[in-house]
Image (cartoon, coloured by chain):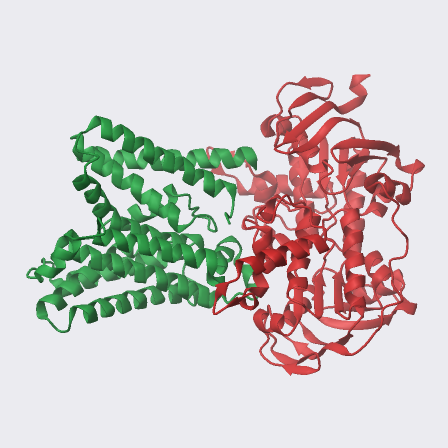
Amino acid sequence: MMDEFVVVMKNINKEFPGVKALENVNFELRKSEVKALVGENGAGKSTLIKILTGAYTLDSGEIYVFGRKIEKMTPIISEHLGISAVYQNLVLAEHLTVAENILLGQLPTRGGILSKSEMMKRAKKMLDEIGYGDVIDPMTRVGDLSASQQGMVAIARALSRNARIIIFDEPTAVLAAQEVEELFRVIKWLKETGRSIIYISHRLEEIFQLCDTVLVLKDGRVVGEKKVSETNEDELISMMVGRKVQGGIYDPTRKIGEEVLRAENIKNEKLKGCSFSLRSGEIVGVYGLVGSGRTELSRALFGADPIESGELYVLGKKVKNMNPRRSIDRGVSLIPEDRRRQGLALKLSVKLNINLPIYPRIGKMGLLSVSKEKKNAEYYVKVLDIKTPSLNQIVMNLSGGNQQKVVVAKWLASKAKVFIMDEPTNGIDVGAKEEIYQLMNSLAKEGAGILFISSYMPELMAICDRILVMRNGRIVADLPREEFDEEKLLSYAIRENTDAVVS
Amino acid sequence: MRKSGVTLTTQTVVLIVAVIMWIALSFMSPHFLTITNVQNIMRQMAIQGVLAVAEVLVILTAGIDLSVGSLVALVNISMSKMLVAKVMSIPMIIVVMLLMSALVGFTNGVMVYDLKIPPFIATLGMMTILRGITLLISGGSNVFGLPRSIADFASGNFLGLPNIFWFLIISVALVEFILRRTSFGRYVYALGSNVEAARLSGVNIRVVTYGVYTLASTLVGLAGILETSRLWMGVPTTGTGYELDAIAAAVLGGASLFGAEGNAFGAFIGALIMTTIYNGAVLLNVNPFWQRIIVGIILVITVAVDQLRKRRTG
């Protein structure tokens, strides 16, 4: 019975100080199976994967790989067994070439000297296998590739190590729609060639497109395992969060008022003339593929990157030489794409992070009011229901959803009127996403204007009043809610590269 | 108030080690726990402590300042020259020295922020330049003939503590206050943890960078003045290697070279440990060459233990 399974994990327990990360978890993976692992952040998905790859040691339990009992899993043993992880934040050496990355640790040498031709040949072979031999040049620097191509390099690297079990952790978070299709094609090919896949994603519809089975984790325990053909999104969501998510998050009761932000033909290195306006109470989506300029737009509006020409009006007043400080003082805020790198001081406390933009306002002449600082943080931790043991907790130790709430909290504290949110739901669990959507609605209801940038169409279509579509640094469409249509949006976003016709 | 439990525990551990050392040394040498020796330790520690406090400020921003030793020497030589030449009153000379040091720090800040030179290289350059200037203006020879009052100040006491030790106390209190109670202090930590996040939160990175390097060098200037008082002459080679002792003391006190961890009180404890080792070694007639070996070993062990603990809890 055992040999049918490539991985069996029995009664896995893992405890971190104060948290039971996994409790009697059983996990089985068959040959050629694509198994989805879903659950809210902190449910134990990452911990389970890290135990399988040897990054964490388990407290108790048994692991069998290909029927063999593994007494002590380490990263090296795990790799020898053919377990390979393609992580959310890809761990490629950006300065090295594609070939070097694929073959790192097993570079072909002749008498100690690197054999370039052999390296090229082998890297090309790996890329050929996944159908990318002609798309990606093995001599390109990895840093010069798109996120999707980097993902393919990571897969080729796994293949070059004879990976039999491949783990995908949120692989589509940074990909645009047609890139996701590509990835799925490759994953399906991996399955057909006898490899087993563990697939972690917060995007449930992907699981229905791709996976055979789905295992739901909640609070470190297995809630259930289903065949994908025998379940549906609603059921999975209610298993995950223990409550049924209300359909339809659009709030038609919002009142659209005065204009809070207007851009007129703004240009810089990446933007080739963008004009739009945003009103109070309005949620405007920005959709675009990777490289369309959507992130660059958000940064330019906030003053994080310079604007070379064009005009910007905030609350009806023209502003010149935007920089983050001026933006904040005028009530503009940016929730950046990469919260860990741009949004948070991870090594510092929840309290400091929440107060960071408003220190000039909570003291006199640079002297802090420590009590105000604390009250402020306390208040927003409560309002946003941020799960943290204390205000002095280091942000690094919070879950992704709670980290994102800390970012939101600091802009609430700054009394922002304009919220520019760049992929605010990226890499956070379903429950936290729901909370972020509700928060956007209530912010807009209280009169804020929200620019919601996302590469995930369903969430934009669900919540926005209008959607701006970007392509090549331009806003190419401004669609009202009545005209929302996935195909239409996508065709605007890619029209130049394909023959798609707007219907 | 603590930024993290880790900082607290590193400091506590190092503090306990210091206390154990003191207890052990007072049993091993009858001369250790005498008023004279304790005051002696305080005098030795004062200058190193002020430098460690200056260093910790820069380290908190994930930077480093290698120019502190050379700046001590430059202040020592120029102050001695001015005192001998009697160009102005002593208080004025002190003010000029502090301003000169601040200017050096400001220049470091400009190199780091505007010229985007990594702090290690920028301050390495500054270290070499300042040492060169010091040798140039002194012609490589010592400067004698300083007023008696200068030496008296270093040997004098106030409320039972050596005069110069009070400056260490003031420096620790001042920097600790800045770090804990001002927005500038918060920005120093924010800069060290994540520059981009700090910038996008409206922190003026330029001002904070200038401020940190300028404040640090001003404290170094103070240390240079205290050094002059202690030496009662100008020695162009003084301060050699002080930067490494300052970094070691900061790290022993829980500062992380990756930034955002540490504080001024930690630097104080670090300096205390190091001075105790040097002092104890002299009293116990240990070959002085062993002192450095011991300090090095303790430094490496402290950081290794800290890393292990972080890995376990992380």
Q: Position of residue B111 (x, y in %)?
A: 38, 65
Identity of the residue furthest to the front in this view? B159
Q: Is residue A162 above or below residue A436?
A: above
The quadrant in which the C terminus of chain A is found is bottom right
Q: Position of residue A332 (x, y in %)?
A: 66, 70
Residue at the image point whose x is 79% and y is 57% from the top: A437
Q: Residue at x 12, y 56 (%)?
A: B151
Across and down, in percent, residue A273 comes to: 70, 77
| Residue A477, placed above or below residue B20 | below
Q: Quadrant of residue A478?
A: bottom right
Q: Residue furthest left?
A: B145
Q: Is residue A180 above or below residue B15?
A: below
Q: Colour of chain B?
A: green
Query: For the point 86% across and 59% down, which residue is it?
Result: A462
Quarter occupied by the N terminus of chain A: top right
Q: As rendered, which of A450 and B161 lies closer to the eye?
A: B161
The reply to whether residue A324 is visible in this rendering is: yes
Residue A117, image quadrant: top right
Is residue B237 positioned above or below B218 on the image? Answer: above
- Residue B154, image quadrant: bottom left
- Report the front residue among B154 and A483: B154
List x then y, in percent, for residue A83.
68, 31
Q: Judge whether residue A146 can be spotted in this image.
A: no
Colour assignment, chain A: red
- Left of B174 or right of it: where is A226? right
Q: Count the marks.
A: 0
